[in-house]
């Protein structure tokens, strides 16, 4: 609770880094970011077609939250040196983008996945990315 002198809890992607992350820590951080923003991504996608003013405002807030999370996760994933771990992290981000109905970004990220096994899993789970 942020009332009564307490600070409002921060987001997983806003937490400062203590230093450089190793690949395992970076992959875990990307996973945590994607999972904590998944609700916002789904809510932003579901509210996109509702014409009410309050729904548009809520959709904008949730969309901004999802976009900040996705951007932070992508920045962390780009710095990973292990290709397989990076591809696994990118897969998490692709799932987040598809939850928000952001197919354009998901397709771009899907093309960045190099590991054949991870690429096959993503294409099996999301055949719309193959087009």
Image: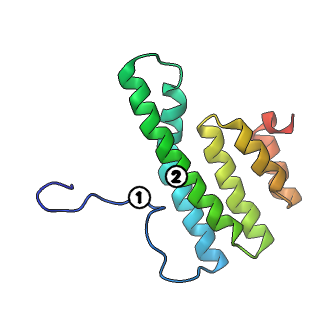
* Number of marks present in the image shown: 2
Measuring from the top left, give residue 19's x and y in whole percent: 53, 83
Q: Residue at x 50, y 34 (%)?
A: 44
Which quadrant would residue 91 be assigned to in this image? Answer: bottom right
Q: Is residue 7 left or right of residue 101?
A: left
Q: Quadrant of the C terminus?
A: top right
CB atoms at circles 1 and 2 under 8 Å apart?
yes
Numbered badge on residue 11? 1
The answer for how far apart the CA atoms under marks 1 and 2 are is 10 Å
In the displayed structure, 59 sits above or below 105; it is above
Measuring from the top left, give residue 68's x and y in whole percent: 52, 52
In the displayed structure, 54 sits above or below 34; it is above
Label 1 environment density (alpha carbons within 10 Å; few <14, some 14–19, many ≥20): few
Nearer the N terminus, badge 1 or badge 2?
1
Q: In terms of secondary structure, where does tag 1 sit?
A: loop
In the displayed structure, 50 sits above or below 115; it is above
Q: In terms of secondary structure, where does tag 2 sit?
A: helix
Q: Quadrant of the N terminus?
A: bottom left
Label 2 environment density (alpha carbons within 10 Å; few <14, some 14–19, many ≥20): some
Q: Residue at x 79, y 33 (%)?
A: 128
Which quadrant would residue 81 be assigned to in this image? Answer: bottom right
Q: Is residue 7 left or right of residue 44?
A: left
Kindly identify which residue carries mark 2: 68
Measuring from the top left, give residue 86's x and y in whole percent: 73, 66
Q: Is residue 81 left or right of residue 62?
A: right
Q: Residue at x 53, y 53 (%)?
A: 69
């Amino acid at each position: 609770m942020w009332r009564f002198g307490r600070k409002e809890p921060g987001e997983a992607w806003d937490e400062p880094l203590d230093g450089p992350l190793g690949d395992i820590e970076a992959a875990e951080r990307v996973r945590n970011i994607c999972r904590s923003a998944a609700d916002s991504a789904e809510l932003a996608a579901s509210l996109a077609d509702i014409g009410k003013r309050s729904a548009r405002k809520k959709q904008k807030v949730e969309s901004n939250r999802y976009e900040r999370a996705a951007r932070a996760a992508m920045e962390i994933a780009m710095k990973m040196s292990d290709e397989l771990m990076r591809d696994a992290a990118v897969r998490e981000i692709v799932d987040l983008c598809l939850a928000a109905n952001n197919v354009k970004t998901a397709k771009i990220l899907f093309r960045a996945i190099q590991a054949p096994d991870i690429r096959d899993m993503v294409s099996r789970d999301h055949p719309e990315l193959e087009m």
